[in-house]
Image (cartoon, coloured by chain):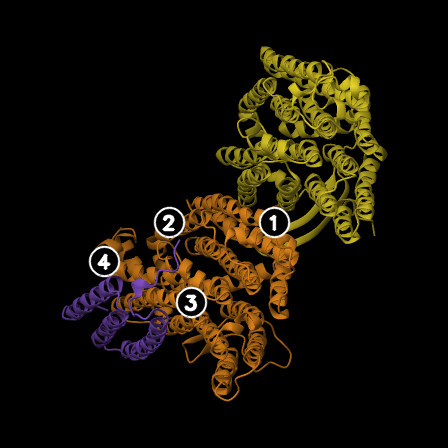
Chain colours: A orange, B purple, C yellow
Amino acid sequence: MVMEMIGGLLPELSLIAGSFVILLAMARIDEGRWPATVAFVSLAFASLFTLAQLTELPGLGFVPQSGTVLDVYEISVFAALLKLLFLVGTAIVVLASPGYMDRASMQAEYYSMLLLATIGMMIVASSQDMLTLFLGVEVTSFASYILAGSFKSEPTSGEAATKYFITGALSSSLVIFGMSLLYGSAGTLTFAGLAEFWAGQVERYASLGQPALYLFMYEPIQAISVFMVLAGLGFKLTVAPFHMWAPDTYTGAPDTVASWLGGVGKGLGIVALLKVFLWALAPLETGWEPFVAGLAILTMTWGNLVAIRQDDIKRMLAYSSIAQAGYLLIVLPVGTSYAIAGGVFHTFTNLLMKGGAFLVVAAFAYAGIGTKLQDYEGLGRRNPFLAISLTVFLLSLAGIPPLGGFWSKFVLFSSAVDVGVGGSWLWWLAVAGIVNSAISLFYYVRWIRTMFVETTMHPKEIELPAGITTAIAVCLVAIVAVGFAATPVIDWGLQAGEALLAAAP
Amino acid sequence: MAVELATWWYVALSGTLFAIGTWGLMNRDNAIMILMSIELLLNAANINFAAFSAAHGAQDGFTFALFSIAIAAGEAAVGLAIFVNLFRLQDSVDVSKATLLRG
Amino acid sequence: MTVPWLSIAIFTPLVGAVLTMLAGRRQIGRVVSLIASVVPLGIGAGVLARTPGIDDFVLKESIAWVSTDSLTITYTMALDGLSAPLFALTALLVAAAILFSWEETKRPLSFFALLLVLETSVLGVFAALDLFVFYVFWEFVLIPMFFLIAIWGGAHRRYAATKFFVYTFLASLVMLLGFMGMYFGLPDGVPATFNFLELQQYTAGFSVELQILLFVALLVGFAVKMPVVPVHTWLPWAHVEAPTAGSVLLAGVLLKMGAYGLIRFAIGAFPFAAVKLAPLLLVIGIVSILYAALVCLAQNDLKRMVAFSSISHMGVAMLGIATLNEIGFMGAIYMLIAHGLLSPLAFMMCGSIQHGWGTREIDKLGGIMQKTPTMGTFTMAAFIGSLGFPGFAGFIAEIAVLVGTYQAFGWIVIFPLLGVVLTAGYYIWAIQRALHGELTAEHADSAHEMPFYETAAVGVLTFFAIVYGVWPALLTEHINPFVEGLLSTVGVI
C-alpha cells in the first residue's frame, strides 16, 4: 500500500528531492553550474518514472500505470502524458539557462523554483478534486511569480513580478471563491461528485421540460460559481479579456522564464480547464459551451490583432501566445477525445515552438542584441543557425506544413469541423482559427523578412554557450520531426482524451 | 443538498468582503494595501467553506479552509518579497510607479 | 521490390538543394543544382515518352503515413494523363530557370537551393493523390517562393512577398477546411481516409448543400492560386517584383497548380456542384479574360504586361473548365502546358531585356530587333506565341476552348473572342513600340546581346512551344483519356 503510493508519486518526489537539494546545498556551495545539473538530473529521473507510467519499462515495475493515490491523486494516461510533456519542456529550459542566467544574483533559487513550478503543474494534471487542483495551481503560481523577478536588480524584472503577482492573486481568489460557491451548491469537492450533482441538476430541469441553460437564470449563484472558476483559470491561460498581465510579464521577465511561461506554463491553464470543464462540469456543457467558444474566438482574434502592431519581439511573442491560448480553448466546447488529442498535441508543439522562439530571443539577448524590430535586421547573416531556428518556430506557430505546429492546429481545427459536419455550429471555431492563422502569418513574416532581407552594418559573429544552442537545436529537431512522425503523438493524445472522458459521466 | 437560509447570510458577508477586496486590489496603489486586499479575498472564500461545511455537515470544506489559510500565508510571503524588491528598485511601494513595460 | 521512381524524382531536387548549399562555390553549386533538376526531368519525360496515351495512374506508390483511430493519412503518389505533362513541365522549367540564372551573383548558392526546394514541393503537388499530402506540398511551395521574392526581388519586394504569402496562405486554408469537410463528411462505416481515389467514391453521395459548400471552399483556394479576377491582386506584385527565375516558376507552374487542383479535386469530387456552378465559372473566366486584357493595354512595363496577360490566359483555362465538355476541357489542360511554356519564355525575355537594355519600360525601349537581333527574335516568338498565333501551342489551346465554349454556351463565345482580339492588340502594339520603332532609347549605346546561357534556356522553351504547336497529338494522346475518364464521372458527356 505504502510502496504503491510512493511508486505512484515517484515523478513528483524526484522533483521535490531535486528542488530541496538545491535549496539546502545553496547555503554551503555557491559557485558553479551544479544547481542546473541537479535540476536536470531530477527532471531526467522524473521523466523516466513518468514514462514508466505510460509504457511498461522493464525494471520499473514498481511504478503503477494507473490507479489513485489516497483517492485524491489519479495516475492515468492523461496525467502521465501531460506530466511527461511538462518535464521535457522544463528540461529544455534548464538546459538553456546556464550562461544566460549568469547575471542573476540567485541562480540556485531559480532552478529550484523551476522544479517547484513544474511540480505544481503535475499536481494539476493528476488532481481528482478541487482542493488538489487549487493547490497545484497555487504552487505553480507562487514559483512563477518568483521566477519572473529572477533578475532582482533589474527594474523591468521587478515590475514584471509585481504585475504578475497582483493579477495572479486576483485570479486565484476568483478560482477559490468560485470553488467555495460550487461546494456550497454541491456539497462535495471531488470532480466525480460535482459531475454527479450537475447531471442531477440538468436532469431536474429536463424533467420540468426546460433546457439546462435556464439553470443559470434561476440559480444565479451556480452561474456565478461556474463563471468565476472560468475567469480565474482563464487568467492563468491568458484568455482574453483576462490576458493583460501576459505581455508585461513576458517582456519584463528573464527570457528563459518567458520561454517557460509561454511554453510549458501554458499547460497549467489548459489542463486545469480540461479537468474542471470536461469532467466536473461536463454535464453542464450546453450551459457553458457558447461562452467558452466565444472566449476562444475572442482570445485568438484579440491576440493576433494586437500582435500585428508590436515591434518588440517579446511583446509580439506574448500576444501570439495569447492567440495560442485561443486555439487551445477550442478543445473545451468540442470536447471529443480527438479534440483533447489536439489540445495535448498543441500543448506539446507550443512548448517546443513558443518556448524555442523565446530561447532564440534569450540567445540573441545574451549576445547583446536588443528586442526591437530594427535590432533583428540582418541576423540571418550574423548567425544563420539562430535565424533559421526562429524562422522555423515562427512558421510552425503560423501553421505551415509539415512542421509540428501545423499538425496540432490541424487536429484542433479538424475536430471542430468533425462535430460541425454533424450539425453543430462549432465549425465556426475552425473558420475563426483559419482566418487567425493567416493574420498571424502576416506579423511573423515581418520578423522573418527583417532577419533575412535587410543587411546589417555589423557583420560580427555571435558566440553562444553550448547549453542554449543545444536546447534550441532540440526544439528545432523535435518540431520538424514531429511533423513527419505525428502518429505516436496523436495516438497518445487520443488515449489521454479517452482516459479523461471515461472519468466523466 | 439544500442549504439552510441562515447560511446565505454568511455568503452575503463573504460576498461583501470579496467585493471590497476586489475593489481594493484594483484601485489601491500602495503595495501593503494590495496585500491586505488579497487577504480579504482569500478569507472571503474561507468563510464560505466554513459555513457550507457546517451546513452540509461535512469535513471537506473545513479541510479546504485550513489549506487555504496556509496558502494565504504563502501568498503574503511571496508578495512581500516581491514588494520589498520593488521598493529596493524604485524607492517606493507605489505599484502605479512601475510603468516601464507598456505597449 | 519496385523502384520508387516517383519519389526519387520528387526528392532528388531536395537532396540537390542540400548539396548545393554545401558546395561552397558558385561554379560547383550551379552544376550540382542543374544535375539535380535534370533527374526529375528525365523521369517525367520518360513517363510521357514510354507510355503512349496514359489512361491510368502510373508509377503509383502508397504507404501509410499517419494511422490512428481518428486520422488516417497515406502517402499516395501517382501520375496520370493530367499530371504527367505538368510534372515534366515543372522539371523542364526549373532546369531552364537555373540555366537562365547561371551567372547569378547575389547569394547564388541559396538561390539555386531555393529553386530546387521549390521544384520538390511543386512536383509533390502534381503527384500527390492524398489530399493531406497534397496540402502539405501545396503550402510548402510558399516558403521558397517567399524567400525568392523577398531576397532577390525588385524595389517593392518586401510588400510583394508578404502579400503573396499571406494572401495565398489564407486561400489555401479555406481549401484545407474543404478537405476537412470531405474527410469528416464521409458516411458512417466508411473507413475515414484522405486518399482521393477512395474519397471520390463517396463525395457524390453527400447532401447537395454540403457538396456545393465544399466545392466553393475548394474553388476559393484554387481560384486565388490560378488566379482569376477578382482574387488576382497578389499576382502583379509578386510577378513584377520577383527575380526572373521566380517569375518563370510563378507563371509556369505555380499558377498551374490552381487549375490542376480545380480539375482534379474540385470537379473530380463534386461534379454535381460543378454543373450547378458552371455559370459562375463561366462569368469568372470571361471577366478575367477581358479585364486582364484591358489592363494590359494600359501597361508601360513589359513585365507587368506579361503578368496581367497570365491572368487573361488563366481566364481562358477557367472558361474551358466551365464548358464541362470534352473539347473545352482538353483546351483548358492544353492551355496549362502552352501557357507554361510561353509565359516563362516571355518573362525570361523581359529579364534579358532588363539585363541588356537596363529598362523594361516600353516607351524607353525601341529598335531591339535592330540592335540585338537574337533577343528581338525570341521576344517576338514569345509575344506572338502568347497572343495565340498558329504554329505555337497557345493557338491549339485557344481554338479548343473557343469551340468548346460555342458548343456549351453558344453566342457567349463572342466575349472570349473579343478577348483574343484585345490580346493580339496589346502584344502587337508592344512589339511595334519596343522591338521595332526607332533606336532612340537612351540605353541603346550600351545595350548588349543576351549571353549564351540565357539563349540556351529560352531556346529550349521556344522549341517545345513550337513542337506542341505543330504536333498536338504528342500531348492530346495523354490528355484525352483523362478528360474522357473525368467526364464519364461528371456524367454530362
Which structural element holds mark 2?
helix
Q: In this view, does C34 lie above or below A221?
A: above
Which residue is labeled 1 in the image?
A: A401
Q: In this view, does A61 lie above or below C321?
A: below
- Crowding at dot 4, Cα within 10 Å, few <14 / some 14-19 / many 20+, comes out as few
Residue drawn at x 64%, y 79% is A58
Which residue is labeled 2 in the image?
A: A294
Viewer-nearest of discs 4 and 3: 3
Viewer-nearest of discs 2 and 3: 3
Amino acid at circle 3: Ser
Alpha carbon separation for disc pair 4 and 1: 46 Å
Residue drawn at x 23%, y 65% is B24
Viewer-nearest of discs 3 and 1: 3
Residue A25 appears in the rendering: yes
> Earlier along the polypeptide chain: callout 4 or callout 2?
4
- Crowding at dot 3, Cα within 10 Å, few <14 / some 14-19 / many 20+, comes out as many
> Earlier along the polypeptide chain: callout 4 or callout 3?
3
Q: Which chain carries label 1?
A: A
Looking at the figure, which quarter contains the C terminus of chain A? Answer: bottom left
> Which residue is at the far bottom?
A28
- Crowding at dot 1, Cα within 10 Å, few <14 / some 14-19 / many 20+, comes out as many
Q: Do labels 4 and 2 share a chain?
A: yes
Q: Mark 4 lies on which chain?
A: A
Which structural element holds mark 4?
helix
**Looking at the image, how many numbered discs can be counted on the residues?**
4
